[in-house]
Structures are given as C-alpha cells and as structure tokens.
Amino acid sequence: MLDSSSRSGSTRSGLSGRATLEEPRDASPHGVGTSTAPRRKQPRGGTRKAVNRLVEDDLIRRVSFDEYRDKVRNVYAGPKGALLATCSLLSLHSPMGERLFRKRKFSLDGAKRILDVGSGAGQIVKHLLKYAPCDARIVGIDLSPEMLRRARQRLRSDRPEFYSADLTHLPFADATFDCVTCGYVLEHLPDPRMGFRELYRVMTPGARMLLLTTEDSFGGAWTSRLFCCRTYNREELRGMTHECGLVWHRELWFSSVHRLLRAGGICVELVKPA
Ligand SMILES: C[S@@+](CC[C@H](N)C(=O)[O-])C[C@H]1O[C@@H](n2cnc3c(N)ncnc32)[C@H](O)[C@@H]1O
C-alpha cells in the first residue's frame, strides 16, 4: 500500500516556501463601498466576526508552511498533545464523534480500506476499531510521531497501521482508500486545497470522507488560539471542496441541538464521484 516511507519511518519533508494565502474571509455581500455610495450598515454578526478574528491565531498566515509545520509538531509533542485525548473527552468531541458512527450518520458499511488523517491520540481510530467491518484495513497517519506513539499506547491494538506522514504528501498510491476520516486536521493547512487534492488522489472513485473541522465561530477562534490553527468559513470551504473534485454530499450535526444552534463546527460527508 505504501509507495515510499516505511511504517515507522519519519515524516517526509513536504512543500517548501510560503503556501498560498487565502482570499479575504468575509467579503461584504454589499460589495466595496465608494465615497459616493450611501453608507451601509455592517452586515449582521459583523462585530462578532471582527472579534473572532481578533481572537483567532494568525501564525499560519505569517510564516512559511515548513516553519508552521515545525510549530505544529512542537505543539503536539508537548503538553497540549499529551492532554489531547482528555480535551476531546471533556469538550464532548470524542463521544459526539462516536455518535456519528453509532447512529450511522456516517456509515462504515462495506468499507475495506479506511484512512484516518491526523490521527492525533487515536480518537477517531478508536471509533473505527469499534464500528468498521472486521475485515477493513485501518490506516492512520499523523505529522507528529509523538502523537502516533500516544495513539498506539492508548489504543492497545495491533490492528491499526500508523505512519508518520503529512496530509499534503501522503505515502500511498492513487485510489487506495474507499473511506477517509479527517478530524480537525485541515485547520492546520494554510490552504485546504493542498489537502483536498491529495485526499482526492488516494480515494477510490465513489469513496466517502467524513470531514470535521473548525468553523469561524467564537468557539472556533479559541480553538485556533489554543492549537495555533486556522478556522474555516463553511461556504468558502464548500466551494473549495468542489474546486478539488469532491462533492459536498451532506452536512452532518452531532445532535439536533447542535443543528439548531449551528454549533459543533463543520462536519460533512464528502464524496469522490464514481
Ligand atoms: C486536533 S488533532 C486531531 C485528532 C483527531 N483526528 C480528532 O479527531 O480528534 C490534530 C492532529 O493533526 C495532526 N496534523 C497537523 N497537521 C498535519 C498534517 N499536515 N499532516 C498530518 N497530520 C497533521 C497533528 O499532529 C495532530 O495530531
């Protein structure tokens, strides 16, 4: 399955230089004002978005991708990485994530080769071990060898194969996986298309992906500050998935309360067309 680095090998070096910077976030729906145009009120929520941007960490936009990745490795190698599994439990992300599989909101039925991207402490792999078909091969990758060590230690299972690798340079052949899970990793890329294109490449036609990522909400801004990541505007992200050939199949919510409050971040099933 692997096309290069060994199972226990070190992370391959990835893109160098400065990554593409994103478009400005929230272009006014009213367009750019001119001196002759009547003054328009700020769109509703404008103040909130401005506050979010003040809170949000902007390292990812200020340094090269190589520098940024070193920072990410350091963050996860340290105490934040050690506490990641506990944080996922306390923030309810882990139990809510499990619910998605248990209730078959994201079904693993028929999956034969599953890739978990950015496995961290193995939070999603733990659900895969519980809900994936017994004969499914489960592969996890992470930029941080230290997080993989923690995942192995926590899961105490020989079944998942873990590799140290970068989402933007996956060490797998084209069309390897019929199912992908990608939880809270995409926010560590300056441009999500770098990840989507690579995931598209390793997905088989018809493969499905569960994508969870941080939204540009107040809670998301604090997550960004804590883990030095970025956040995504839902509609912009949707446009970028399409640009990379992936279909935004359906939005998922942890619960009806999350749906009502539009809380819990972006959770979506993406499909590579058959
Ligand atoms: C917040 S944790 C997510 C853990 C788990 N997937 C979950 O759903 O809770 C993010 C993980 O992504 C990893 N990561 C960040 N950038 C990455 C990249 N470019 N390629 C692979 N993994 C990356 C980090 O090392 C970290 O372990």
Image (cartoon, grey):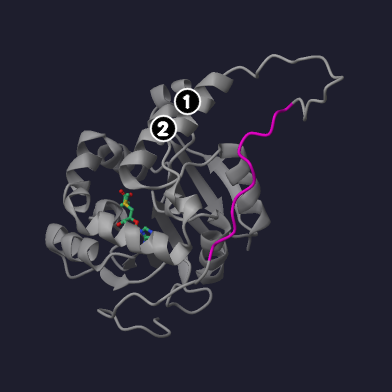
State whether the magenta stretch is mostly helix, strand or loop.
loop
On whether residue 23 falls in the magenta region, the answer is yes
Give the side of residue 160 with respect to residue 212, left or right.
Answer: left
Estimate how packed mark 1 is, as few (under 14), some (14 to 19) or many (20 or more) residues with alpha carbons within 10 Å.
some
The amino acid on which the numbered mark 1 sits, given as a three-letter code, is: Val
The answer to which of 57 and 173 lies nearer the viewer is: 57
Q: On the rendered image, what quadrant is the N terminus found in? A: bottom left
The answer to which of 132 and 261 lies nearer the viewer is: 261
Quarter holding ligand 1: bottom left
What secondary structure is marked by label 1?
Answer: helix
Give the side of residue 5 with respect to residue 159, left or right.
Answer: right
Estimate how packed mark 2 is, as few (under 14), some (14 to 19) or many (20 or more) residues with alpha carbons within 10 Å.
some
| Residue at 30% from the left image edge and 52% from the top image edge | 124
What secondary structure is marked by label 2?
Answer: helix
In the rendered image, residue 241, in percent from the top left (x then y), is placed at 60, 52
Q: Is residue 242 above or below residue 159?
A: above
Q: Identify residue for label 2.
A: 55
Q: On the rendered image, what quadrant is the C terminus found in? A: bottom right
| Residue at 42% from the left image edge and 77% from the top image edge | 171
On whether residue 17 falls in the magenta region, the answer is no
Give the side of residue 80 with respect to residue 227, left or right.
Answer: left
| Residue at 70% from the left image edge and 29% from the top image edge | 28
Q: Identify residue for label 1.
A: 51
In the rendered image, residue 25, in percent from the top left (x then y), is placed at 60, 38
